[in-house]
Amino acid sequence: APAVAGVFSSAEQRLRIPWSIADQSRREEEPVLEGFLGLLQLVSSRCTAPETAAVLENPVILARFGLTENEVPLLRKMISSAGIRQGLDQRGKKDAALHTWEAGLDRLLLGCLTGPLDQPWQGIMPISGGLSEGGDWLGSLAEFISSLQRLKRQTARPLPPAGWAGVLLRLINRFLDSGKREHEEGLLLLRQQIADFVDNCRRAGFERPLSLAVVRRHFRQLLAAPAGGQAFLAGRVTFCNMVPMRSVPFKVIWLLGMNDADFPRSQQPYSFDLMAEKRLPGDRNRRDDDRYLFLEALLSARHHFIVSWLGRDQRSNGPCPPSVVVAELCDYINRGWRTADG
């Protein structure tokens, strides 16, 4: 899905093709939801430099703090130069205090004010190289880390459901609400899910404090569910999984990734699976199911049936065979039909 989105979303306007991806969870469809869950995971972790930078690079969070994707490489470079490793501040740290986000930001901010110095100023050695390469990214980074410190303090202790609702709504307003219309649906869904969470707890008579781990798990499971009402038949190029009962006639059907090792899917039974040791007629077989799905796709194509696979090995550049069902189809066509030119 990310590869498909990267190719089809980056096309020029004159080459743009309407498209959609089906069979995705709401979390995968909406960067707002991914940013929300990423923040909940981040504040309960050690806030290492890669983890924090990955959350910050969410497009919704970047826009909220006035950053652009072009500034991401510079951000990563300066985070590494400042020696930031883990931890938001120096609380509870001794030897590792110099590698926290707070200490690293002090070095970057001092370097922005003073430029290079030959010796530390009040125990802080400034970092100056590269600070002139991009606009206001340093202030935005400092604002993000400050907001993250506040969020970490707010989520450090168990809260009742109503208390968590207030914290989560403030999280949305502070980190995710960038005012862009394309994210309104995800923000509305998040606020609705938080309201439902509080309402369900109230109806159940549950008002005891909950830890962040419980709240995070609840929303992760909730947002991982498949999105309802996906536009499968909406007059666009649709990317989807091969699943049963999808044998609807289409003018063009293209099967991607029909590699020998990937399709039909192999099934490795567990050692304690007694049904796999002695199969009976009617027992499910995933390879047979995949062969049937391939036949369904073939019968559904009206004008063009296209199949692609990796033709060369990525390491040795040697030829790679297609799936056995593709080879069987080619053999069947060669035996039964011949064009006018032979």
Image: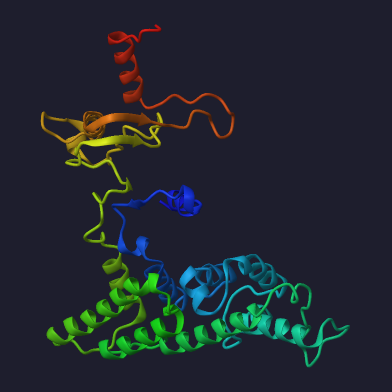
Percent of width and height locating residue 269:
27, 38
Q: Is residue 265 visible?
A: no
Above or below for 51 versus 233: below
Percent of width and height locating residue 311:
49, 28
User: What residue is shown at x 34% (from left), y 71% (from top)?
Assistant: 186
User: What residue is shown at x 40% (from left), y 7% (from top)?
Assistant: 341
User: What residue is shown at x 31% (from left), y 35% (from top)?
Assistant: 253
The extreme right residue here reads 118
Q: Quadrant of residue 122?
A: bottom right
Percent of width and height locating residue 103:
67, 84
User: What residue is shown at x 64% (from left), y 65% (from top)?
Assistant: 73
The extreme bottom residue here reads 122
Above or below for 332 versus 100: above
Percent of width and height locating residue 83:
70, 74
Q: Is residue 298 visible?
A: yes
Nearest the viewer among 219 and 207 is 219
Q: How many marks?
A: 0
Nearest the viewer among 183 and 257 is 183
Q: Quadrant of residue 330?
A: top left
**In the displayed structure, does residue 190 sit left or right of residue 280?**
right
**In the displayed structure, does residue 299 sit left or right of residue 157?**
left
